[in-house]
Amino acid sequence: MNTRTSVPDALEVLAVFCGGDGRHGNLLGVVRDGRVCPDEASRQAFAKELGFSETVFVDDPERGTVDIYTPGLRLPFAGHPLVGAAWLLDLETLDTRAGEVWARQDGEFTWITAPAAWAAPRTLRQYGSAREVEALEVPPPGEWIYAWAWEDESAGRIRARAFPGRGDGIEEDEATGAAALLLTDRLGRALNITQGRGSQLLTAPAPDGTIELGGRVRHAEPPPVPTR
């Protein structure tokens, strides 16, 4: 089955967690009509072929029912796909396999709210300086590592990089919302995270134990469709 050529009309590509200059951000594929990939196998195949860190399929655009995939896994929850979907669908809630996620728009930022417990476990590895984080080589597959260091602890500013370690072609994740939730939960404070080449993620813990995660979203150019 040529899954790629069956989807382009329903596919939108977004950059999520862009920097203040509008650059960078983690690319996200959004299939706005999930019926074009009606089952888990076809969705997984398309997500693998598209090759982004995550692809989201919209099953009900009015209720915000979405289904999230990496190139090799189906996920109950992930940060950057949900921030992107919230921006694109302009809804107050999203219905995920993990549960209901609240969303809101605030000027140039789109926010979602969720408990950190919904994020898959990752190794949060602290370094002594932002320069050390920036100098890291991609580690071998096997462990999901979120490398971080304070840039300005008093201001809550952090430099981070993310290495999924899944062996699925994504050696480094440009912007990782779930990891930002886990780090915010561990540190217990609002954070302003610069990740990857220059993506920006903002977080704020709430009194009820949930965490708000926000960033800028824009449309991006879709990848070329291969000829076969």
Image: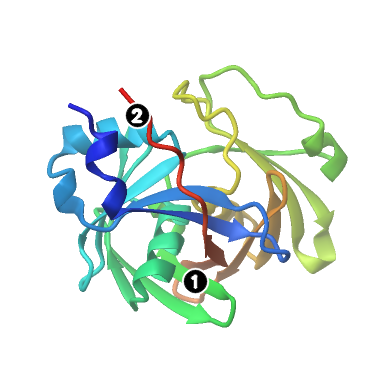
Q: Residue at x 58, y 49 (%)?
A: 175
* SS state under label 2: loop
As drawn, is 166 to the left or to the right of 148? left
Residue designated by label 2: 72
Q: Residue at x 51, y 72 (%)?
A: 110
**Quarter of the figure with residue 153:** bottom right
Residue 30's label in the rendered image is none
The number of discs equals 2
As drawn, is 206 to the left or to the right of 5? right
Give the mark nearest the N terminus, 1 or 2: 2
Whether 71 is drawn above or below 21: the answer is: above
Q: How is the image coloured?
A: rainbow
- Evaluate if marks 1 and 2 touch, with contact meaning CB atoms under 8 Å apart: no
Of residues 110 and 37, which is closer to you in this image? Answer: 37
Residue 131 in picture, x, y percent from top left: 86, 39
Residue 196 in picture, x, y percent from top left: 68, 44
As drawn, is 82 to the left or to the right of 183? left
Residue 76 in picture, x, y percent from top left: 30, 48
**Quarter of the figure with residue 188:** bottom right
Residue designated by label 1: 111
- Asked whether residue 71 appears in the rendered view, the answer is no
Mark 1 nearby-residue class (10 Å; few <14, some 14–19, many ≥20): many
- Name the residue type under label 1: Trp
Viewport quadrant of the C terminus: top left
Whether 139 is drawn above or below 184: the answer is: above
| Distance CA(mark 1)–CA(mark 2) | 27 Å
Of residues 44 and 137, which is closer to you in this image? Answer: 44
- Name the residue type under label 2: Gly
